[in-house]
Structure formats: structure tokens, C-alpha cells
Image (tube, coloured by chain):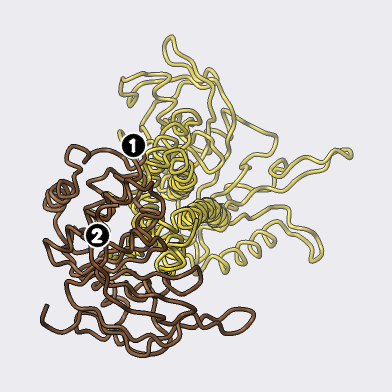
Chain colours: A brown, B yellow
Amino acid sequence: MAGPPLIVLEHLGKDYETDAGTVTVLGDIDLAVEAGASVAIMGPSGSGKSTLMNILGCLDVPSRGRYVLDGQDVAGLDDDARAHLRNRVVGFVFQGFNLLPRVDLAENVALPLLYAGVAAAERRRTAIATLARVGLQGFETYLPSRVSGGQQQRVAIARALVTRPRLILADEPTGNLDSRTSHEIMRLFTGLNASDGITLVLVTHEEDIAAYARRLVQLVDGRILSDRSTPGPAGGATP
Amino acid sequence: MIASLLAEAWQSMKANRMRSMLTMLGMVIGVAAVILMVAIGNGAQQSVDESIASMGSNLFIVLSGSTTSGGVRMGTGAAPTLTTADADAIAELPEVAAVAPMLPGTAQVIYGPNNWSTVVAGTTASMLVVRDWPLVSGSAFSDADVRSAARTAVLGRTVATNLFGDEDPVGKTIRVKQTPFVVVGLLATKGQSLTGQDQDDTILVPVTTAQRKLFGTQFPGTVRQIMVQARSAEVMAAAEADMTGLLRQRHHLPERADNDFDIRNLTALANTAAQTTRVMSIMLGAIASVSLVVGGIGIMNIMLVSVTERTREIGIRIAIGARRRDILLQFLLEAVILSLIGCFAGALCGIGGAVATHLIANTMIVITLGSVVGAFALASAVGVFFGYYPARRAASLQPVDALRYQ
């Protein structure tokens, strides 16, 4: 795929101040991700995967280096501009689903549109259509607690999709799911990647989940250990 | 956007119905207390003001002194030291506008089959000037009536009602202590005095008639008290000094002797009463406002709990694109809605309570639009003030920390 990369990281680093002194979580990360790519980031606990995801999702700011998302240098942006990026450019999917327990599924999916300034009726209509795309038509008025974990994660994916973002960040999206459901969710992701060209970056520690991505980045102690292409979704799709 | 956030705030309040209601209760009590207390305070002030206005302005009352008889000290007004001549002399003073001597006594009055016990006050026509007391019918007795000790009478409204009902009493003859009197005038209603007496329960007759025919004593020409109206508020002090000098001279009091009379500045007393009432009503309002502030602190408390409880929700909202001001607005709106609903219920309770107070205790209450609007404004201000801190705390949460919060 042509065009400039969607994500560019240059000498990116992240330190945390703790009582014991400064802890470097991410050392010196250089990474470029083309639009339409699918990348799996793997690594042991404490390797900095989640911190990297939070920075990519504009939830956290790097201590050093440059992060360019969709042509914009994120370091130079204020709170509101980063909120805008989170809303329009990035869709986040969490391990723990993170749905609002008190409102129904359509309302959950519609939430990003609220902050995008879309009118109420239009929000609900778009949310219901997006729920249908992830295979959840008829569940619109259910509360999150009434549906299964796999269905909740589908709702979370619909919520990530509803503002038509260019990038989906999935932080251990199958960590709370059984094996069969995990593969269903991954097929949904790869399908979106293939059909809509949505760039996918996911963090996992399961080999068979990582195998759905076409590119695999190994992270150890805040540094990139390896960065290689994989056989791609076809290879992992049939366990 | 605001409408959506309002809906969200409403949702979250519905989800914690019990808690929201208890929080509002603080507001309800605060607002109700403010409205009720201000209504009672205003009512008290208004009834005092009305009493003062009914009394007449720049008034002195000169009372005859006390007397000691065989070791038994009688109260003020018991000694027959003031006379109508004293009153006439006081009237000559430059600071004095009008003077009315007064010799009151209690008597049974009879008209046809009706009878009534009332205060019969011997006085002059100037009484109506001094007390600023208009007639609704007939006229006052004349100075000639006073000179000749005529048997004419002016009735207060209460007496007229009890003796005549709806009939016009002017021209009729009543009997006071078996003596016939012709009714020449009917006084306008004056209402209660500062001390709660019915000022309309009285009959005015010429002072000479009272002295000679009704309440005769062994000291001819004495009166119980003299009412004096000064020309203006500024000359009150001078008038008091002149009257004291004049009366001491007339009574031939030696240098060191005590006054055998007592001058009271009624206007000053009334102003003190008004001042007291004013301070009271301000105090009532202030105490009530404290409960409003306590209600506000209740809101802040609940909002802080709510922010902590919903830390994860806030994290999610930030992650999907909420700006800090969206979060701030959401929690602020929640606090304001809580306080406004509480305020509305409180206003109803306060007005209801004021009306109930009026019906049960029969006190005067005044509910002004200003006090209700003021309570609303205060409550919204309290909501914003105490809602802002929790809301800002919510908005300043770090998204990564908020999402990690369990």
C-alpha cells in the first residue's frame, strides 16, 4: 500500500518516576506502520507493550522521541487535539471490554459519536448499523451484563468502529475470552482489516492470536527485539 | 451536546436513585428553611412596621409619677401629678405640634340590648391628630364639647361592631356607666398595637366629661397621661428637655427631687422594636442559609464518591474521545441538576410550610418573589460551587490511571 506511513515512531522512550527512582519502560523505539497493515506486538509481562499501546492511542505521552500519527506530531498537540485523535482516528479495544454497565449496547456503541458532536437520533441509527456489522443485530437494547464475553468484545469493537477510524488498537483483546471465541474475534478483526483497510495493531502474548497479523514485533525490556513478516491471517486462521 | 449530557446526568442519577434522593434532601431542607425563615422574618417585620405606622410619629407619652402610701409603692401613673393645665402648657412649647391629655378607665357601655366592657378614654380632639387616626363617619367632639364637659363620644371600630353590628352608630345614644352619651364619630380601624392590644377597642370622650362624670377623683383636673407629638424627629431631644424643665417648674420640684412624672419616647421604643425584628429576621435567614451550605457540602460529598466510583467510566470516556471539558460539564451538570431539583422541591416545601405556619400559628408571613428567586439562585450557585471541585477532579484524571482503576 502506497502513501506515507500511518504511524511513525522515532527514538521513542517512556520513563516513569517512582519512589525507587526513574524506571525506563520504553527505551528507544523506532517503528513505522503503513496504513492498512496488521501488526501484532508480543512480549513478556513488563516488556512495555501496554505502555506502547497507550502512547499509540494518545492516552499517554512519550518522555522522549517523536510520535507521528496520520501526519500529525502528537507531542505538539494539546489535550483537546489528542481527544480529537482518540475520537476520530483511533479506535481502542481493551482486554476487559470496558463497556458502560448502566446503558444498553446501542448506547455504548454510540458514545464516541456523542463526543464527535453527532445528533442523538443519528447516533443511535449509526450505532445500530455498526452493531449489525459485528453480528449483533437484535441486541441493541440489552445491557452489557446480559450478553456473553465474546459478545461484549464485539460491542467494544463496534464502539471502536463507529467513528470510522483509520486505526484500531487492541490491547490483549482475547485475554478474557475462551479459545473458540478468541478466534471468532480475531477473524472479525482481520476481516475489517481486509475489507475496510483499517490498520490493526494488537498486543497479545498468545502465538496463535499473533499469527492473525501479517507482521510480528517482539518487545523485550522496552526494546524491539525482532520485527518480521508472518505468513499472515491465512496461516493462523485455521487452528 | 448539552441535551445529551443532561440525559446522561439524569441516567446516572436514576441509577443511584436512593443516593440522589438523600443528597437532594439536604438541598430541599436548606431551600425550604431559607424560604420559610425569610417569610416568617418578613412577616414579623411587616406586622411591627404596621403597628409603628398605626401609632403615630414622633410621639412622647408623659406619665404621672408613682406614689408611696404607707410603704406601699404604687406604679407609674398612680399619683395624680399631671393635669389638663400641664397639657395646655406643654402645647405652648415651640417643638410641640400637638398634645392630647388622656384619662382612661374601664367602663361598661350599653346600647339597646347590647353591652360591652371597654376602655373609655377622656381626651381632646387633638388625640386624633397625635395618633394620626382618621374618622370613617361623623366628626370628633369639639373644643366646646371639652370646655362644657359635653356627653359626646367617638367609638372605636371594635366597640361599634359589638354594640351596633353593621348599623351606623353616629347620632345614636349609648350609656356609659349609666350616663347617656351621643355618638358623634366612628374611628377608622387601627389594628393591633406593638404589644398586641386591640387599639380599636376604645371610646373617646371629652377629658372634662371623663374627669367630672366618669372617673372622678378627689383631685380635679388630673389626667393619667399626656400624649405629645413633636414637630419633627430632629427636635425630639429638645422637646423632651423642655417638657422636663416645664413640668418640674410647674410642679414646684426642688432641685434635688426626682421627677414626679415620666417621659417616654414612644418612637424610639418603636424603632428599637423594629430594629430587633430586623436583626431577628436577618438572623433567621442567615441560619437557614447555613443549612443550604450544608446541603451543598452534601452534594460535594456525593459527587466526590461518584467520581471515585466512576473513575473507570471516566477513563473509558476519555479513551473514546471525551475532552476534559466534556467530563467537567457532565459532572457539573449532575451537581446542578441535583441542586435544582432539590431546590424546586424545597421551594414547594418552604411555601407550604409558610402557609401552614400562617394557618396554625396565625402569624403574619410574607413570601416575596425575591426570596424564592434568591433561594433558587443561591441553590444553583451552591450546586455549581460544590459541584465544580469534584467535576474538575474527574476531568483532570489521567486516562491511563483511570482505565487501570478497579
Name above or below for residue B395 compared with residue B4: below
At x 45% / y 66%, what residue is drawn?
B393
Residue B281 visible in the picture? no
Q: Nearer the viewer, residue B349 or A155?
A: A155
| Secondary element at tag 2 | helix
Name above or below for residue A230 compared with residue B297: below
Q: Residue A159 placed where, x, y %?
A: 24, 55
Name the residue type under label 1: Arg
At x 43% / y 82%, what residue is drawn?
A223
Name the residue type under label 2: Ala
How many numbered callouts? 2
Residue A163 visible in the picture? yes
Q: Does residue B195 appear left or right of residue B233 in this picture?
A: right
Q: Residue B401 placed where, x, y %?
A: 47, 67
Check contact, mark 1 vs mark 2: CB within 8 A: no
Given the image, what chain letter belongs to the residue carrying mark 1? A
Q: Nearer the viewer, residue B198 or B231?
A: B198
Given the image, what chain letter belongs to the residue carrying mark 2? A
Q: Does residue B172 appear left or right of residue A20 in this picture?
A: left
Q: Nearer the viewer, residue B44 or B156?
A: B44
Q: Residue B369 placed where, x, y %?
A: 32, 49
Label 1 or label 2, whichever comes before in sequence order: 1
Query: Which numbered disc covers residue A55?
Result: none
Q: Nearer the viewer, residue B339 or A2?
A: A2
Q: Which residue bears the numbered disc 2?
A: A160
Name above or below for residue A219 compared with residue B251: below
Q: Which residue bears the numbered disc 1?
A: A146
> Dot 2, crowdedness within 10 Å: few (<14), some or many (≥20)?
many
Q: Residue A105 placed where, x, y %?
A: 26, 45
